[in-house]
Image: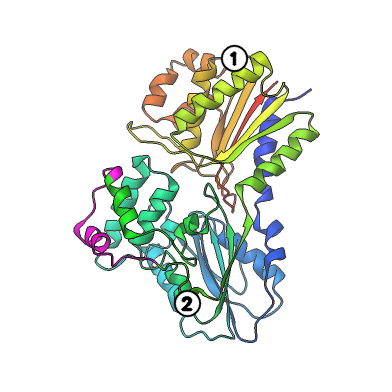
Amino acid sequence: MIEPRDLLTRLFHTAVRAAQPEHCIAAFLPKAPKGRTIVIGAGKASAAMAQALEQHWPGPLEGVVVTRYGYAVPCKRLEILEAAHPVPDQAGEDAARRLFKQVQGLTEDDLVICLISGGGSSLLPVPGAGVTLADKQAINRALLKSGATISEMNCVRRHLSGIKGGRLAAACAPARVVNLLISDVPGDQPCDIASGPTVADPTTCADALDIVRRYGIELPAGARQLLESGSGETIKPGDPRLARVETHLIATPQMALEAAAAVARDAGVTPVLLGDRIEGEARDVGKVLGGIALQVRDHGQPVAAPCVLLSGGETTVTVRGQGRGGRNVEFLLSLAITLDGARAVYGLAGDTDGVDGQEEIAGALITPDTLARAWAANMPPRAHLDDNDGHGFFEKLGDSLVTGPTLTNVNDFRAILIL
C-alpha cells in the first residue's frame, strides 16, 4: 500500500540527490594543464562542487569560491567564503573581488575551472560604475517583490554589475576556462545561471531598461545612467576574450525530474513529466495544476491513477501581503484551495536548495484534509494566500518540509500524487 507522504518525500529527496555534485562532477573534469589550475566559483552548490572537485583532481589546485551562509563544506586546497542570499552584502562584494584577483596574470598554459550554481547572482555583487552596494541591495529587493521572472531579474543584474555578464571570464583570458554549471533556471540558459559571470550575454542595456519600466522598479541615478548610457553593456557572443571558454551543464532540473520519475515507477505509480521550465505566478500555476489533477482523478485523463504529476521551473510571487511566504508554499496553498479537499490527491512542492523565499524551509506538503484542518485551527486559507503567508499556514499545520542546506540547487520541484 502506498503511503502518500512517504512517497512524495522520497521523490523530493531523490531529485535533490540526483543533483549532488559528488554524483555528477567527475565526468566533466578536463585534463590537467601545463600551467596552473585555478578554481573559482559562486552559488549555493559551489562549496560542495569544490569539495567534489578536490576529491577527483590529483594535481595541484588553488582558488576560491563563495557560497551562501551556512552552505560551506570543508576543503583542503580551495578556500571557501560565505556571503548573503538573496539580498547581497559586503561579504559578497569582498568575495567577488577576491575572485577577480585570483585570475589576474594568467597565461595560455593555465586552466580556470569555474563552478557556478544558482544563487550566484547575489553572492557576486560587484557594482557597475556609479552604482553602490546599497543601490544593488535596494534594486534586488524590488525585483524579488515585483513578480519578474528569473531571466528578467538576471538581465537587470548583469547590466548593473562589474563581474557578471561574461566579465569574469574576460578577466581570465588568455587562460582556458571550463565552466561547470548546475542549472536552477527554466531553459538552462548559461547566461541566466548566477547571471552568467563566465559566459557571453546576448541581452542589452536596452533590454534591462525595458524590464525596469515594465515592473515599475525605481532606479537610483547612478544605475539609471549606467543603463541609459549603454556603459553597462556586457560581454557579447564572439568576443575574442571568450574564445577559450567551454561550458558544461552537469546537473539540471530535467535530470532531477527523471530521477524522481524512476522512483515513482518502482512504486507502481505512473509518472507524468509536465515540464522543467514552468513559470508564472505561483498561485496561478497552483490553479492550473489543480485542474489537471482533478481531471485525472475524475476522468482518468490524460492518464489514469495512480500517477504523479511532476514539474520543475521557477514560479514568481508578486508580494502584496505581509506574511512569511515563498513561491513553493504559495503554489501549494493555491493548489489546496483549488482541490478543495478532493479525495485521493496529495501534493509536495519545495526548492531543491532547501530555502523557499527567505525562510530556512524548503516547502510543504498538502493532503485531502489540509483545508479541513486549517478551518478547525481558525486559519482561513484564502486569507493566508492573500497575505502571502504560505510558510505561516503550513508551519502551523505541521506540514512544512524542512531539509536544512541541501548543498545543491536545481530549482523548484513539484509533485501531485493522485491515487
Instruction: Write the residue at 75% across / 28% down.
Output: 269
Callout 1, which amino acid?
Ala
Residue 257 in the image, given as x and y percentages of width and height:
66, 42
| Residue beneath disc 2 | 240
Callout 2, which amino acid?
Pro
- Classify 111 as above or below 260: below
Residue 223 in the image, given as x and y percentages of width and height:
25, 59
| Residue beneath disc 1 | 342
Outermost residue toward the left? 221
Q: Nearer the viewer, residue 377 or 412?
A: 412
Q: Find numbered disc 2 in the image and state the secondary structure of the residue it sits on.
A: helix
- Where does the magenta region start and end? 214-234
Identify the disc placed on residue 92.
none
Instruction: Write the residue at 67% across / 73% down.
Output: 30
Instruction: Write the residue at 44% across / 62% down.
Output: 201
Q: Find numbered disc 1 in the image and state the secondary structure of the residue it sits on.
A: loop
Q: Is residue 162 inside the magenta stretch?
A: no
Residue 38 falls left or right of residue 302: left
Q: Nearer the viewer, residue 229 or 77?
A: 229
User: Quadrant location of the C terminus?
Assistant: top right
- Classify 246 as above or below 104: above
Residue 154 in the image, given as x and y percentages of width and height:
41, 54
Q: Nearer the viewer, residue 172 or 230?
A: 230
Residue 216 falls left or right of residue 77: left
Instruction: Write the residue at 66% across / 64% down.
Output: 52
Q: Work out whether residue 231 can be spotted.
A: yes
